[in-house]
Image: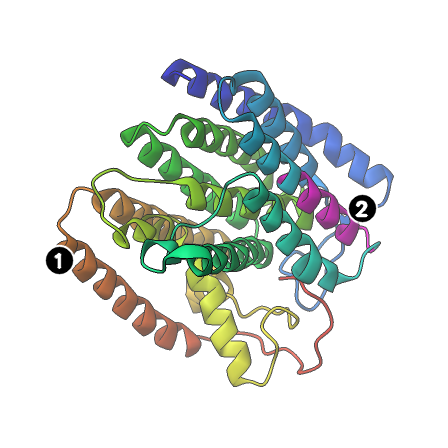
Amino acid sequence: MSIRADLIAFAVALLASLSLTIPVRHLAIRFGMVDHPGPRKVHVKPIPLLGGIAIYLAFALAVLVTVHGAPEKQVAGILSGATLLAIIGFLDDGKLLHHQVKLFVGMPVAALMLIATGIHAQLFSQFVPGLMGVVLDDFFTVLWVVGITASFSILDHMDGLCAGIAAVAAAFFTISASMNGQTLVRSLGAAALGASLGFLRWNFSPAKIFMGDGGAMFLGFLMATLGLKIRPDGAPFPITWLIPVLILGVPIFDTTLVSISRARRGLLPFTSPGKDHTAHRLSNLGLGHRGAVLVMYCFAVLFGAAALFIPGSSPATAYTLAGLLIFGSLIAIFFMEGAPYERQAKIPKTFSA
C-alpha cells in the first residue's frame, strides 16, 4: 500500500462522512433518535443521535476500497470487532440494551476478536517466557481495549470533543506508522482521520448531530487497535508502549481524573455520569464549551508530538520525558479536582458520559 492509497483512504472516508451525516441526521429525527436536554447534559435543545453510522460507513468504505494486500484475517477481525461495538452502541442509544452489556460483554468480546486474529499486546511475553507470558499479554489486551473504548465512550460529552480527539490521535498514529513503514496502520489511521474530520464538520459547536455511543465506542475501539499495532522502529521495549499511551493521553487523563474524583466521592466511575469531566471543569473556569474543547485539542497535539519524539531519543531521555509527563499529569489532576464542577448523586443509573 502506497502513500497514494492512504490519501485515497483519507479522501474517501472524509467525503463519505461529510455527505452521509446529513441523511443520517434526518433518519434519526424521523425515528425519534434524539438526545434530550437533561441535568447532566450541556445542550439545551434535542439533538439527533446516530451520527456514528456515518462515521462507521465512511471508515468501512475507505478500508474496503483501499486496503489490499494486507493481512485479511486481521482486517476482518478489526472490522468485526468494530461492527459489534457499533451495533451495541446504537442499541444502547435506542434504549434497547442494558448499559452494562457494552462494558462487560461487548468490549471484552471485541477484544477477543482481535486476539483471535493475532492482534494483541506484546508486553509481558518480552520478559515472561512460555504460556504465562502469552496469557498475561492477552489479559492486558482485553484491559487495554476495554479501557480505551470506554474512555472514548465517556469522552463524548461536549460538542466536537470525541470526534476531534479521535481525529488528532488518528493523525499521529498515521504519522508514526508512516515513519516506521507500517502500511496497514497508516491506512487504517488515514481512514479513521477522514471519517472523524468529516463528521466533525457537523458535530463541532454548535453541534447539529451527535455520534451517539455507537460512534464513540467505534472510534475508541479503532484507537485501541491502532495502539496495539503501532511498532515504532528504534525504540526499545518497554519504551515502545509510551507511543500509544501518549497519543491517547487526553482520553486516558480524562478517564483517570473522573475515576479518581468519583471514587473519592463514593461513586462508581463508569456508572455515575455527570458534568465532572476535564472539559466541564475547563469550561467552568471561564473557557466556555468551545474554548474547553479547543484546549483539549491542544493537549492532544502536545501529547502526540511528544510520542513522535520517543523513537529517536535515548532510553534515558524517553524515561525522563515519561516521568515528567506523569508528574505533570498528577499535578494537573490535583489542580482539576479543585476546579468547579456539578456534583452528581451517589445512586448510579447509567453507563454514559
For the N terminus, which image quadrant?
A: top left
Q: Nearer the viewer, residue 224 or 133?
A: 133
Residue 200: x, y in percent? 55, 37
Residue 88 visible in rendering: yes
Q: Let me know if residue 205 appears in the view.
A: no
- Residue 97 is covered by the magenta coloring: no
Badge 2 marks a residue whose secondary structure is: loop
Question: In this orientation, which residue lies closer to the viewer: 234 or 93?
Answer: 234
In the picture of the structure, the residue carrying the numbered disc 2 is 33
The dominant secondary structure in magenta is helix
**Image side of residue 62 versus residue 1, left or right:** right
> In x, y percent, where is residue 260?
48, 76
Residue with the mark numbered 1: 316
- Kindly indicate the quadrant of the structure image that contains residue 233: top left
Which class describes the residues within 10 Å of circle 2: few (<14), some (14-19), or many (20+)? many
**Magenta span covers which residues?**
82-95
